Amino acid sequence: MRLRFVRELSPARFGEVGRPIGGWRRADGEVCALASEIDRLYWPGRAVYEGRRIQHRLSLYDGALERRLGVFDRARFPIRDVAFHPTRPLVAIGTGSYDGGYQFEGDLWLWNWESAEVRTLLGESRDVTACRWVDGARLAVLLHPRDEEEYPGEENEAFDTYVGLVLDDLRDIHASGFRSSGSNRDPRLADLQPIDPATLGFGSSPIESRERRSRFTEVMGSAPYEERSRVWDLMWLSPELLAATHDRCHVEVWNTRTGARLQHIRGEGHGVQLVEALGSRLVHVFRPADFIENVADRSTLFRLGPAGLEPVRSFDHAVVLSTDERGNLLCRDPGDPGRKRERADVVLSASNEEALRTDLGHYDCANHYLRLDGRDGLYFLRGTPPSSHEHKRLCRVDLTGTIDEVMDWDDQATHLMDSAASWLSARSIVRAARVYGPRPGAGSKLIERRDFGADGPTWSVPVDAAATELGAAGDAVVFALMDGTLGILDAETGALRWTEKLEVDGVPTFATTLAIQGDAVAIGTADGRVLLMQLEAARATRAVVGCARGFSRA
């Protein structure tokens, strides 16, 4: 069994561009660079941070923006500046950021987009605010201080303080020797003193994020670009109709047979969940807090119909939805970080009447997120005691407020986070989770089958990254991981049937959500794509086959 690529429903041109943050055009106009962010998977209801395959992306195009020349995904920090070599297929990429407490961090990269050679040029982590070619062999670089206290003055003065130099050795640091095994300092940067950026040929101060974003728009010009980002949820409305929510819309509806987009609804906030409850298909629109206007997070439920969206119910805070087979709806309250109000979980009957308002227990986005929809109860996770995030149990609640504890979610030895789950039968689930570890990346990750009433898992499979989504498809389980892996497991034994890293037209991405209908598998990605795959029998005995690899566009 394997997943075969069928089509990309979302706009394919510039499809790899995430949230745009900057644009540059080479002096001769023949090459363009588009910088974007692949944002963390976070909203107040859910967070999965660890193992994200892509964070910061630079896409290169020809001057007409018709042919993609390459994609650079190695950056560990936001892209601040780009400098094209005057004659060669080389681009210098300055990256960096403030860590939020004390230090400035970043890297300086040199990328040959024709040979794919990548070099890192600095022997220590530095926030590179600007770079430019002095000539074909030398690169001028502008940096922030190492930290807030490196030079005299108030702490906030560090943000307007710059040091710099001209690099004439552009070898990778491992070849140049400017990074030694016993030191984390680059000797070329040891005695730099604050300067006026103009002394190195830069403006009085580097461009800020707003100007970089406006340059993206200028570079794009009239090109047919649609800004898209994280796809949060997908739902099959019929055998041919698929609904999607992402960062730049409330909802869109696609005809998967023709590829036509039938609805595309935008407004304040963005869609995060799609559920079938209250007698309707519902779109959950989340509106982030506006601290300047003193407005808190808000959630609104809309009924999706042929004419658009109709408001059903609003909340003056965020909620997290799950539903049962009768159409009742659990609206969990993720709480107020400022603790200015009491938590209020709400259960709505299928007729949209408030049946219950109570506190089902502490909620945080890394420990308690769960979607187990469409069965005999409204399922949720809560700790022991309910005020805790530890020793969680899978529970269900009904309209009367009766709570049944179904099974232990955490055992005595482990604490599970970043959970995802799906039904296999009325008494069986498949779940994925990350085992908490005190150091980032230290905890193991797993996918396992749990049968209610059993003492332990029926099977358990270790995986390399946290799961974003998984779902049952007949006798198989389809899963997606943060590192870009798509895979298929045997639902009875847990045996691996197929796995591959997801690429579209040779560009890496990772799935954020799945929707399965028969042998059709819809995939939403971190860079805003909506892909259609099909489950089919493998044509060969190899475990690894091409998923979207090799897909080409006209």
Image (cartoon, grey):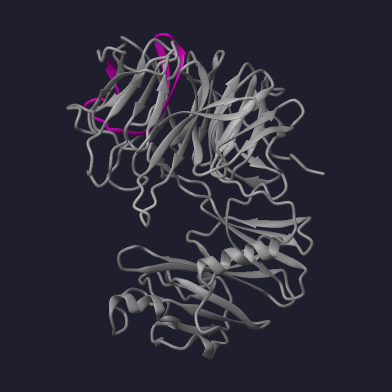
Type of secondary structure dominating the magenta stretch: strand
Horizontal and vertical percent position of residue 357: 27, 23
The residue sitting at 65% across, 56% down in the picture is 71
Q: Classify 287 as above or below 173.
A: above
Residue at the left extreme, as displayed: 385
With 397 as the anchor, is 238 left or right in this view? right
Does residue 163 show up? Answer: yes
**What is the quadrant of the N terminus in the image?**
top right
State which quadrant residue 441 falls in. top left
The residue sitting at 73% across, 73% down in the picture is 88
Residue at the bottom extreme, as displayed: 199
The residue sitting at 40% across, 79% down in the picture is 160
State which quadrant residue 450 falls in. top left
Horizontal and vertical percent position of residue 443: 34, 39
Q: Classify 222 as above or below 50.
A: below
Q: Nearer the viewer, residue 207 or 427?
A: 207
Horizontal and vertical percent position of residue 319: 37, 33
Reply yes or no: does residue 418 show up in magenta.
yes
Q: Nearer the viewer, residue 348 or 480?
A: 348
**What is the quadrant of the C terminus in the image?**
top right
Q: Classify 241 as above or below 178.
A: above
Q: Which residues are magenta?
A: 403-432
